[in-house]
Amino acid sequence: MDTLALKKTANEVRKGIVTAVHSAKSGHPGGSLSAADILTYLYFEEMNIDPKDPKKKDRDRFVLSKGHIAPALYSTLANRGFFPAEDLKTLRHVGSYLQGHPDMKHIPGVDMSSGSLGQGGSAAVGMALAGKLDGADYRVYCLFGDGEIQEGQVWEAAMFAGARKLDNLVFIVDNNGLQIDGNIEDVCSPYPIADKFKAFNFNVIEIDAHDFEQIDAAFKKARQTKGQPTAIVAKSIKGKGVSFMENQAGWHGTAPNDEQFAQALADLDKIGESL
Amino acid sequence: MADVKKIATRESYGNALAELGNEYPDLVVLDADLAAATKTGIFKKAFPDRHIDCGIAESNMVGIAAGLAAAGKIPFVSSFAMFAAGRAFEQVRNSVGYPKLNVKIGATHAGISVGEDGATHQCCEDLALMRTIPGMVVMNPSDDIEAKAAVKAALDHQGPVYIRFGRLAVPVINDRPDYQFEIGRGVTLREGKDVTLIATGLEVAEALEAAGKLEKDGIDAKVINIHTLKPLDEDLVVAAAKETGKVVTIEEHSVIGGLGSAVCDCLSQKAPTKVLKIGVNDTYGESGPATELIKKYGLDSEGIYNKVKAFL
């Protein structure tokens, strides 16, 4: 693993996020920025994928259950070469293939349409189950929001995955602590998250979502774990990398204006230069 | 029709899955703790490794089916209509319909003919719900032969399909050598010039019987079996309406959103015609033996006969 290269890529992914959301004049920058390092690691280090053959049969699959952070997924895919980065500016525009939430029918590299919270986990479980039925060795990854796991369907999926010992499946919770209405503990606390997944027979790993060494160790441990699915609870900072967005629930679903956009890019450029 | 062979279409569903298992190696069958009732247990016996019991979690089951389909499988998802179409509606809409995944939904125990379990389990809204989903094929076979043909047609069709099956044993009415089944193609079972009875599901047999009673009164009723509500065989419906001038729709489903609405949607645009919708009238069902309920709600041949007489 080249940690410096990953950090630089993640910073480019973040620039793509704010560029897309600014151009759309709507979208979800906060949770996109908090998940940028995990997504970068998955697509540049962990997953067996080929931008030239996005549907190849033995590929690893990724489901973005927290579909509203589509800008993060799109920016990662664009940086990985699935489609031109220039297209990110068409996000949420009429006629663009870059829909507000992931659309597997039209976007190269998107393995599952998602956006209605709580549903992605079940689809990921289905993919992992298909892999087991076929004796294939691909792996399946699914990213949830920490507010999203208030949805009961997440736990239906977790119960099934644990009961079926789907060790080719990794659930990741982007634990940035904030949802639209505020702090997740004030809205309807999902804590303790790790204990809940343990109770559903998951191998649970808690990490810092912005530390590539910890991310790397977690996914390696998941790969080695047999007879259990893995849940990675990744403590993150909502809005990570853009100073005025960090830890602000208000930036969950608000686009930056021109001035804020310039400031955001300046922040990220500064980070880039420091690497 | 006392000597006519009767089979519940849920039974036909289970048998068809088991019979087609070898021909369709990608077929997998999902159930939610109702394999004995939905009859997918018949498939499970033949193909234990390809039958997945998801437990009592229908929303998750539909999502798992979406994932299986995304990975190349052809999943048939099974539960009672209330839970497959009702509880999991949004999962069907967003995880299956929107991505146009190759998921088939085999929903049993539809309508008031569920019987004794009563209103909570008698889904009279499933056809309406499923019709609203873009790209969804919606079928409601009338007997054993048609139910099996519908399962095979669903497996050959690329994209989401909903098939409604019943709990009550119903007469086999399509047992003839020239029987053919095609998605979206209605079947004229009886010619007539005075009125067209358009029926679906177990009401097709009742409509045929009602036509016999009407004949004794000198009323010549055409009978059409619509096994596919979506896409609707509009050409057949329009031609029949123009030919007979009056149309009656008959379904074991709410009069809101099902066959009657589909026919009216079509005729109001293409051939405005007076239509009588016979079905469950914006109400819940209740407990009781299925045949008694069908009679009480005016959905037996006698009830149909009386309503058609009053309509004409």
Image (cartoon, coloured by chain):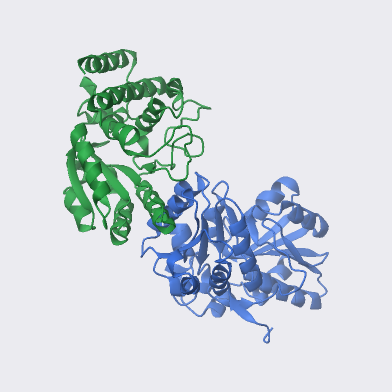
Chain colours: A green, B blue
Q: Nearer the viewer, residue A212 or A145?
A: A212
- Quarter of the image with the N terminus of chain A is top left
Residue A124 spot, x, y in % from top left = 37, 49
Residue A236 spot, x, y in % from top left = 20, 34
| Residue B5, image quadrant | bottom right
| Residue A35, image quadrant | top left
Residue occupying the far bottom of the picture: B3
Q: Is residue A144 above or below residue B136?
A: above
B137 to the left or right of A134:
right
- Quarter of the image with the C terminus of chain A is top left
Q: Nearer the viewer, residue A84 or B243?
A: A84
Q: Residue at x 34, y 30 (%)?
A: A72
Q: Nearer the viewer, residue B223 or B80?
A: B80
Q: Nearer the viewer, residue A182 or B143?
A: B143
Q: Is residue B261 above or below residue B223?
A: above
Q: Residue at x 21, y 20 (%)?
A: A243
**Residue A177 appears in view:** no
Residue A185 spot, x, y in % from top left = 17, 42
Q: Residue at x 54, y 66 (%)?
A: B21
